[in-house]
Structure formats: C-alpha cells, structure tokens
Image (cartoon, grey):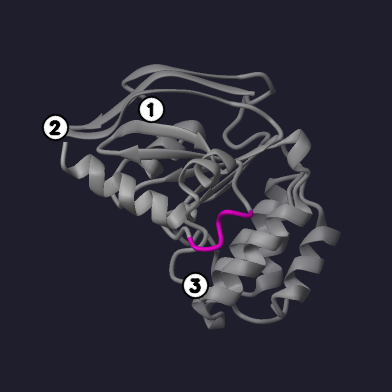
Amino acid sequence: MINVQDLTKKYGKEKGITDFNFHFEKGNVYGLIGPNGAGKTTLIKLLVNFINKDKGSISKNFEDNTRLNNISYMPDFDMLVSGSVKKNIEFFNLTYKDLDLEVLDNILEKFEIEKDGKVKNLSTGKSKAFRFALCVSRKVKVYILDEPFSGIDVITRTDIVENIISVIDIEESVVIVSSHELHDMDQLLDYVLLIDKSHLLITKSVEEIKEEKNESLYTWFIETVKSNKKK
C-alpha cells in the first residue's frame, strides 16, 4: 500500500532518516520504535507530506493528491483549536468529510469527554484521548499515530490500544504507530521497525520476537538498542 525507497532527510549536518526502505501492507499494525531522536518523527512527517525529502521515493496505491487525503494523522503535538470540544469536532468535520461522528461519539463517551467542555480544561490524558478519537474516527486507508502513549497513564494507554483494535478496520488499512512507550504494545503490533541513529536497524514480527527470545517487546527493544550502542 505504501512503498518507501531510499528515503533520506537531513537537517544540516544532522541526520533525520537515512536510506529508509520498506513496504507497508494493509492488514497490519506497524510499530516505529526507537530512542528519542532516532528518526521516527522525521519518517512520519515525510509519509504525510509535512516536510520535503532530500532523496528517495514514497509511492502509494491510493489517491493522495492533497495533504492527509486518505491518511489520518495524529501528530506528536497538540493541534486542537481553542474553545470547546464541540467546536473542534465541527472544525474537524468540515475539514475531513470522512469523519464518522457516531464512532467519535462512542469513543468520547468511553473516555468521559464532554462536548461542551473547554479544550483548555482537559487533562493531559483526556486531551490526548480526544486527539486520538478524532484520528481513528476517520474512514481512511492509512492511520499514522506519532507518540500516542507519551505522557499518559496506564489505563488511558490500555483504552487507546483497545480502541485501535476495535474501531479501525485493520484488514483494509495500514496502521503505523510511533512510540518509545512499549508496555502493553505486544497485543497491538504485528511488526516492529526499530529505527536508531537515523537508520532502519531491524524489522521483525512481534510473534517472531516472542518465539525467538521468549521475552516481551519492551525487553527485546532495550537489549537490542543497548547492543547497537556498542557498535
């Protein structure tokens, strides 16, 4: 569904992502994992056309002639406008015609987010849950979530994981989740792409990791990154 070849982006002398090659296929949830500053967010911004590449190509077998057309993106920053939750929903609905309001209402109810409430009064967890709800309530081909679990409690994280599984039609979609918070991620991800020092270091299925190492994704990640630092 998305084919990436030799993708490279540099920031002056700093490397964002270097010679990245991968094919994202529908029916899978991919985890972009790696230390902070490894290149995960740079890759995501390239996939959603927020920044220009220096080299390489990104090809998609679906219509993507406008920014975020057929791609639903939850960035790692707060994109909500001031005012009420309802105002944000109305703005989002005008911007994206594929928003499923019934699905959105169900998620908001689960997270106990009131539409009449002010966005500025939402807790960190509820603010992130609201942004998450807006993202996954769209009916698109690709869902990309950048650090959706950062700064939230375990219960909210678990609820978000459960909603990704239950709300998104994964069989017909590509789901890409960037995170360094890997607890409880084993049940969500099909494949992990470990990015370190701007390079794609390892690609493995979560099942393969469990069978080979008999350990959690989190433990495997820590051991692999530590091993790479010694090289």
Q: In 3D space, how far apart are the residues under numbered discs 1 and 2 (Cα atoms)?
A: 16 Å
Residue under label 2: 13
Q: What stretch is highlighted in magenta?
A: 183-187
On the image, which quarter does residue 119 sit in? bottom right
Instruction: From the viewer's perspective, tell me whether residue 14 is left or right of residue 56.
Output: left
Instruction: Tell me the quarter of the image containing the N terminus.
Output: top right
User: Of the residues under marks 1 and 2, which one precedes in the sequence?
Assistant: 2
Name which residue type carries label 3: Ile
Crowdedness near tag 1: few (<14), some (14–19) or many (≥20) residues, C-alpha within 10 Å: few
Q: What element carries label 3?
A: loop
Residue at 39% x, 42% y: name it. 40
Residue type highlighted by circle 2: Lys
Q: How far apart are marks 3 and 1 (CA)?
A: 31 Å
Reading the chain from its start, which is encountered first: label 3 or label 1? Answer: 1
Residue at 65% across / 53% down in the picture?
135
Q: Name the residue under label 1.
A: 52
Q: Position of residue 86 (x, y in %)?
A: 71, 70
| Residue at numbered disc 3 | 152
Q: What residue type is labelled 1?
A: Asn
Q: Nearer the viewer, residue 150 or 196?
A: 196
Q: Picture coordinates of residue 64 (x, y %)?
A: 63, 26
Q: Which of marks 3 and 2 is in front?
A: 3
Please count the marks in the image: 3
Q: From where the camera sits, is residue 79 visible?
A: yes
Which quadrant of the rendered structure holds the C terminus? top left
Q: In this view, does 103 lie above or below 153?
A: above
